[in-house]
């Protein structure tokens, strides 16, 4: 069936004729007697312990470190994540409707002053707050701490800070949590004579963020955008022979639609889009400006 195929393959060396399976002289008989069969000597460091179990402890340091990181991921808990206990408790229970927090007029007033004075010191905010309370003693004015606390509950933005190498070689997490210097470049973790890290990075966990989006009637309704649009797109494809007139969203992509039809993506699933890129801000100067975009 392949006689008409012309493959452009390189020439191969001619293989000498091998004996056929009928030529018994080419294959010596197997040892069926009780004679001792020679085997290679047992290695000095066998891969089995005395109990017969396989020794899986890696002998290369990089593999051992990788195994420790994997173990840390397997044993990860919210309590070990670096989140504050208050944020963990909020994540584990259903919060009341955040609309009542957003449209509270006293919170709105306090938040506007907070935004105006964002570049000033906290002392300046406290002084202005005190003036408001003296002039309008019956009119609540939220403190700096109360505003940040409410903003965290409304937005779901709960930052987790970790130390990192000053040259971004590695993060001091997992088995490297207690190191005082980078395991890659060996530069110090802390400022000299202090326990203050030279450089840190922030992680924004998705759980509190998604939870906050469902705590408001308006944003909870918007969270079903993909579900409704997908139904319309599939209907268009069925009506137009598998074609769309306009491709105006990522969910118009064929791979996404196939995943939905296969049942890999369900209507109640939450999808996260992530785009990450860097930018050079100056023509003759290298820049380390990076930006990320998240879409739920």
Image (tube, rainbow, N blue to C red):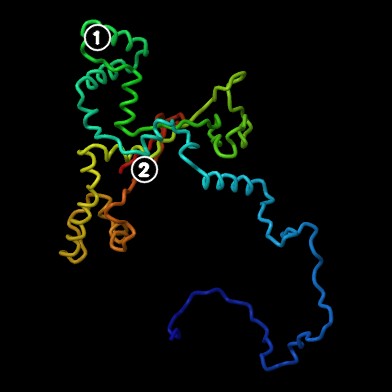
Q: Is residue 168 above or below residue 227?
A: above
Camera-nearest label, 1 or 2: 1
Residue at x-position 24% and y-position 21%: 107
Compared across the picture, whether 78 is left or right of 107 comes to right
Quarter placement of the C terminus: top left
Q: Residue 132 shows which numbered tag?
A: 1
Per the image, label 2 sits on a secondary structure element best described as strand
In the orientation shown, which residue stands out farthest toward the bottom?
22
Which label's residue is closer to the chain start, 1 or 2? 1
Question: How many neighbours does mark 2 have within 10 angstroms: few (below 14), some (14-19), or many (20 or more)?
Answer: few
23 left or right, relative to 166: right
Q: Residues within 10 Å of mark 1 (few under 14, many from 20)?
A: some
Quadrant containing the N terminus is bottom left
Residue at 31% x, 42% y: name it: 295
Q: In the rendering, at what x and y percent does residue 18 appear?
A: 68, 86
**Secondary structure type for disc 1:** helix
Q: Is residue 233 left or right of residue 280?
A: left
Residue in front for this viewpoint, 237 or 144:
144
Location of residue 206 in the rendering, given as x and y in whole percent from the top left corner? 37, 40
Q: Quadrant of residue 10?
A: bottom right
Residue under label 2: 275
How many numbered circles are shown? 2
Nearest to the observer: residue 145 or residue 175: 145
């Amino acid at each position: 069936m392949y006689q008409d195929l012309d493959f452009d393959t390189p020439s191969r060396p001619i293989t000498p004729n091998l004996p056929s399976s009928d030529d018994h002289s080419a294959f010596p008989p197997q040892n069926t007697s009780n004679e001792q069969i020679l085997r290679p000597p047992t290695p000095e460091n066998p891969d089995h312990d005395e109990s017969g179990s396989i020794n899986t402890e890696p002998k290369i340091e990089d593999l051992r470190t990788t195994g420790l990181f994997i173990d840390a991921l397997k044993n990860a808990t919210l309590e070990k994540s670096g989140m504050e206990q208050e944020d963990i408790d909020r994540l584990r229970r259903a919060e009341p409707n955040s609309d009542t927090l957003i449209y509270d007029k006293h919170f709105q007033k306090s938040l506007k002053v907070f935004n105006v004075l964002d570049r000033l010191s906290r002392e300046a905010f406290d002084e202005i707050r005190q003036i408001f309370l003296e002039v309008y003693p019956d009119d609540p004015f939220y403190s700096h701490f109360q505003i940040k606390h409410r903003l965290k509950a409304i937005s779901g933005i709960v930052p987790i800070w970790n130390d990192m190498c000053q040259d971004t070689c590695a993060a001091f997490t997992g088995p490297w949590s207690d190191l005082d210097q980078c395991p890659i470049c060996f530069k110090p973790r802390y400022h000299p004579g202090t326990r203050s890290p030279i450089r840190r990075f922030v992680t924004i966990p998705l759980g509190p963020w998604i939870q906050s989006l469902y705590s408001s009637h308006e944003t909870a309704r918007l969270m079903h955008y993909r579900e409704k649009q997908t139904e319309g797109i599939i209907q268009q494809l069925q009506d137009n022979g598998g074609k769309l007139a306009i491709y105006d969203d990522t969910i118009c992509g064929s791979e996404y639609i196939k995943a939905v039809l296969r049942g890999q993506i369900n209507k109640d699933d939450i999808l996260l889009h992530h785009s990450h890129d860097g930018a050079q801000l100056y023509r003759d100067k290298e820049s380390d400006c990076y930006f990320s975009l998240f879409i739920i």
